[in-house]
Image (cartoon, grey):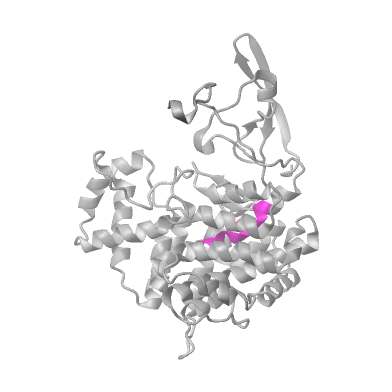
C-alpha cells in the first residue's frame, strides 16, 4: 500500500434515523484504520464535528509512524532509537524526503548539494538590517524563508522534479544561515558566513557563536548532540505545523511559503515553544530554592493556574521515546560544556516525581522531548528565544517530505474544513440612523 492508494477493508454502518449509510474503511499498514467520510455530507447532509482534529485523518502518509500508547516513533519504518544512535541528520533528512536510506554515493551527492547552497544572497543582509534589534528570531526566520522565494523563480515550479529538488536542497542548506543571522541580529553582532568545511550542526554552531575578533572552535561533542536533537525533531506525523505546511501547500503555494507558514505555527508556546517554557519553569523553581515538592503541589492544585511545562503529550500516552534518548544526550553535553547542572538536577527530580506520583501516572503526564531539549540548547549556549529556531531546522526535512508527499498524491485536494454554524439566522439590515 502507498500513501497515494489507500486500501479498503470493508465498510462501517452509520444509522441516521431510518437512513443507513455504508462508509468505506481505509486500511492502514500499521496503527489506526479510518472511516472514509468523504461522501457523508453528499449522502446525508451531515458533517462531522471534531475540534482539534483529534479523531480526523486528513491524509494518508508513508513517512512517519507514531504509536502514542506504546511510545513508538519510526521514520519510514526505522525506529527512532536506531536512527538516533547510528545515523546523521542529513542522512535522516534524505530518508524522510526521498523514502529510502541513501547509498554512499547518494549521501555524498546530497551532502555536497546542501553544502554548495549554504550561502544566502548578499541582498538579504539589508533584509536583516531592517528589523528592530529586539525582533524575535522566529519572526525573522519565517519572514526570511518566504522572502528567499523572491530570489529563485524556479521555486514556483512545484511540479517540475528538478526545480523541486533544487528548492529542497536550498532550504535545507540555507535555513541554518537564516536562523544564525536572526540570532546575530538580536544580539547586535556581525553576521558570520557559513563554512563549507564544517558539518551541518557544526556549521550552525560556528555561525551562531563565532565573531570576527577571535577564533571559535566547535566542540565535536556539542555538534554531535545538536545533530542528535535535529534527528529527534525531524518529523512527528500530522502535528500543528506539519498540518499547516500541508494546508498551505494544498493551495499550490511554493515550498518556501509553505515552510514559512509551518515556522509560524511552530512558534506557538503549545508547540515548538514548549522547550522555552520548560527552561522558564525550571529557572523559577531554582530561584525559589529548588523546592520541587512545592511546585509539584502547585501543579496538582486545581485552583492554581501553574502548570509544569514539558509533561504530557497530545499523542503519547506512554513515555515519549525521544525523551529517553535526549536525557542521555543532556548528560553528555553538560559534561562536555561544564555548564551549570542545577537546572538538570531539578529536572531529574521532577521526572522522578512524575514516574511515581499517582497524579502524574494516572494522567499519563510523562516527560516529553521538550523537557530535556531546552536543557541541551541552554548548555550549548543558545538563548531561550533561539530554541524554537533550532527546532525549525530539525523539523524542516519532515515538513518538506510531507509537502512533497501531499503534492504528488492524486487524492490531494485544497484544504477546506467545514464548520458548524452557530450564529444568528437571517436578519434585515437596519440603517444606522435607526440603531
**Residue beneath the point at 44% across and 46% down:** 313
* Image-based side of 322 in relation to 406, left or right: left
The furthest residue to the front = 433
Residue nearest the observer in this picture, 213 or 329? 213
Residue nearest the observer in this picture, 359 or 178? 178
* Image-based side of 283 in relation to 53, left or right: left
User: Can residue 393 be seen in this snapshot?
Assistant: no
Tell me the magenta residue range: 392-403
Q: Is residue 32 above or below residue 228?
A: above
Quadrant for residue 5, please give it: top right
Q: Position of residue 231 (x, y in %)?
A: 55, 62
Q: Position of residue 169 (x, y in %)?
A: 69, 67
Residue nearest the observer in this picture, 185 or 111? 185
Q: Is residue 201 magenta?
A: no
Q: Is residue 37 above or below residue 32?
A: above
Quadrant for residue 412, please give it: top right
Q: Position of residue 271 (x, y in %)?
A: 47, 52
User: Can residue 411 be seen in this snapshot?
Assistant: yes
* Image-based side of 287 in relation to 2, left or right: left
Q: Is residue 198 above or below residue 273?
A: below
Magenta: main secondary structure: helix
Q: Which image quadrant: the N terminus?
A: top right
Q: Position of residue 103 (x, y in %)?
A: 73, 67
Q: Is residue 398 magenta?
A: yes
Q: Is residue 338 above or below residue 46?
A: below
Amino acid at each position: 500500500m502507498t500513501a497515494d492508494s489507500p486500501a479498503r477493508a470493508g465498510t462501517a454502518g452509520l444509522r441516521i434515523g431510518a437512513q443507513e449509510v455504508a462508509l468505506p474503511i481505509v486500511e492502514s499498514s500499521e496503527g489506526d484504520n479510518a472511516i472514509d467520510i468523504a461522501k457523508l455530507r453528499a449522502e446525508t447532509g451531515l458533517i462531522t464535528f471534531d475540534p482539534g482534529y483529534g479523531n480526523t485523518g486528513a491524509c494518508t502518509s508513508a513517512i512517519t509512524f507514531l504509536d502514542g500508547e506504546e511510545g513508538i516513533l519510526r521514520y519510514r519504518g526505522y525506529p527512532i532509537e536506531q536512527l538516533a544512535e547510528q545515523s546523521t541528520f542529513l542522512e535522516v533528512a534524505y530518508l524522510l524526503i526521498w523514502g529510502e536510506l541513501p547509498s554512499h554515493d547518494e549521501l555524498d551527492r546530497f551532502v555536497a548539494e546542501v553544502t554548495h547552497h549554504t550561502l544566502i544572497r548578499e541582498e538579504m543582509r539589508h533584509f536583516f538590517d531592517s528589523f528592530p534589534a529586539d525582533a524575535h528570531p522566529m519572526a525573522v526566520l519565517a519572514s526570511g524563508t518566504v522572502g528567499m522565494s523572491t530570489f529563485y523563480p524556479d521555486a514556483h515550479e512545484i511540479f517540475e522534479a528538478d526545480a523541486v529538488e533544487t528548492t529542497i536542497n536550498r532550504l535545507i542548506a540555507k535555513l541554518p544561515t537564516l536562523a544564525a543571522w536572526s540570532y546575530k541580529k538580536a544580539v547586535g553582532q556581525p553576521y558570520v558566513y557559513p563554512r563549507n568545511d564544517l558539518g551541518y550542526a557544526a556549521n550552525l554552531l560556528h555561525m551562531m557563536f563565532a565573531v570576527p575578533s577571535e577564533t571559535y572552535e566547535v566542540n565535536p561533542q556539542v555538534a554531535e548532540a545538536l545533530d542528535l536533537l535535529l534527528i529527534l525533531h525531524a518529523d512527528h506525523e500530522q502535528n500543528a505545523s506539519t498540518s499547516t505546511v500541508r494546508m498551505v501547500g494544498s493551495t499550490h503555494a511554493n515550498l518556501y511559503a509553505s515552510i514559512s507558514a509551518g515556522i509560524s505555527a511552530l512558534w506557538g508556546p503549545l508547540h515548538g515553544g514548549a522547550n522555552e517554557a520548560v527552561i522558564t519553569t525550571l529557572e523559577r523553581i531554582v530561584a525559589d530554592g529548588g523546592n520541587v515538592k512545592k511546585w509539584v503541589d502547585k501543579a496538582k492544585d486545581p485552583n492554581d493556574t501553574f502548570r509544569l511545562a514539558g509533561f504530557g503529550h497530545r499523542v503519547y500516552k506512554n513515555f515519549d521515546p525521544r525523551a529517553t534518548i535526549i536525557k542521555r544526550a543532556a548528560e553528555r553535553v553538560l559534561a562536555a560544556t561544564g555548564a551549570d547542572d542545577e537546572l538538570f538536577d531539578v529536572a531529574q527530580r521532577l521526572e522522578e516525581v512524575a514516574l511515581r506520583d499517582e497524579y502524574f501516572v494516572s494522567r499519563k503526564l510523562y516527560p516529553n522531548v521538550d523537557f530535556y531539549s531546552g536543557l541541551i540548547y541552554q548548555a550549548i549556549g543558545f538563548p531561550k528565544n533561539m530554541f524554537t529556531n533550532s527546532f525549525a531546522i530539525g523539523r524542516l526535512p519532515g515538513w518538506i517530505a510531507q509537502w512533497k508527499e501531499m503534492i504528488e498524491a492524486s487524492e490531494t485536494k485544497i484544504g477546506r474544513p467545514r464548520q458548524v454554524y452557530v450564529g444568528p439566522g437571517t436578519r434585515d439590515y437596519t440603517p444606522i440612523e435607526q440603531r
